Image (cartoon, rainbow, N blue to C red):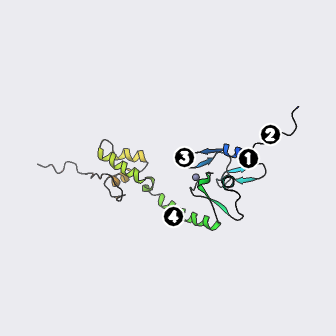
Amino acid sequence: MPKSSGRPPVAPASRFWSKVDKTDTCWLWTAGLDISGYGRFFDGTKESKAHRWAFQDDAGPIPSGAIVLHSCDERMCVNPAHLRLGTHDDNMADMRARGRQARGCRTNTAKLTADDVVVIRELFAAGGVSQAALARKYGVTSGLVSTIVRGETWSHIGGPRTQVGRGKGSRSSG
Ligand SMILES: [Zn+2]
């Protein structure tokens, strides 16, 4: 007869990390989330935010009053390398900083990295690919691609500039 002590206890840490999808950057919590989008984890005694639990598991207890901040801005992320201790004031400062960035990021150009810009210029200069195709590939407008290949935007980034003539053939009058 087995003892009546119920299931053998599983260490909270092994349960915790089995719910984590470790990508190359962020380690994403795959179990339940709270209404704010933070992971929730019940360790058998109490429920915690998953990223706080991960931080404690890695670095030890969180001082009272301290909060655990994400450097990656991904609330589901529990990668200890992306977590740091901070205060509520730090958090508000981060949110303000990100608010400014977020406004900038809604512009078309922010979808592209400097590398993308160089590749777009090289592909277009090499020929055989239209601005519209590049725009679709990178999820931006063809108008933006046009300004990129001419060097009007991202002018500080390298890559070949291509002057796109509108009136093609208009010079060949003789
Ligand atoms: Zn992360």
Name the spot of residue 107 as percent of width and height, x first: 45, 58
Determine if the C-beta at disc 4 is less than 8 A from ligand 1. Answer: no
Q: Secondary structure at mark 2?
A: loop
Disc 3 marks a residue whose amino acid type is Asp
| Residue at (36% x, 56% y) in the render | 157
Label 3, residues with CA under 10 Å away: few <14, some 14-19, many ≥20 = few
The part of the image, by quadrant, that contains residue 59 is bottom right
Looking at this view, name the residue that lies furthest to the top.
1
Between the C-alphas of marks 2 and 1, the distance is 12 Å
State yes or no: discs 4 and 3 in contact (Cβ < 8 Å): no
Q: Is residue 101 left or right of residue 29?
A: left
Q: Secondary structure at mark 3?
A: loop
| Residue at (73% x, 47% y) in the render | 12
Q: Is residue 64 above or below residue 118?
A: below
Between the C-alphas of marks 3 and 1, the distance is 24 Å
Mark with earlier residue (4, 3): 3
Q: Secondary structure at mark 4?
A: helix
Between the C-alphas of marks 3 and 2, the distance is 33 Å
Between the C-alphas of marks 4 and 1, the distance is 39 Å
Reading the image, the residue beneath label 3 is: 24
Reading the image, the residue beneath label 4 is: 100
Reading the image, the residue beneath label 2 is: 8
Reading the image, the residue beneath label 1 is: 12
Mark with earlier residue (2, 4): 2
| Residue at (69% x, 51% y) in the render | 40
Label 4, residues with CA under 10 Å away: few <14, some 14-19, many ≥20 = few
Q: Nearer the viewer, residue 139 or 91?
A: 91
Mark with earlier residue (3, 2): 2
Which disc is residue 37 wearing?
Answer: none
Disc 1 marks a residue whose amino acid type is Pro
Name the spot of residue 17 as percent of width and height, x first: 67, 45
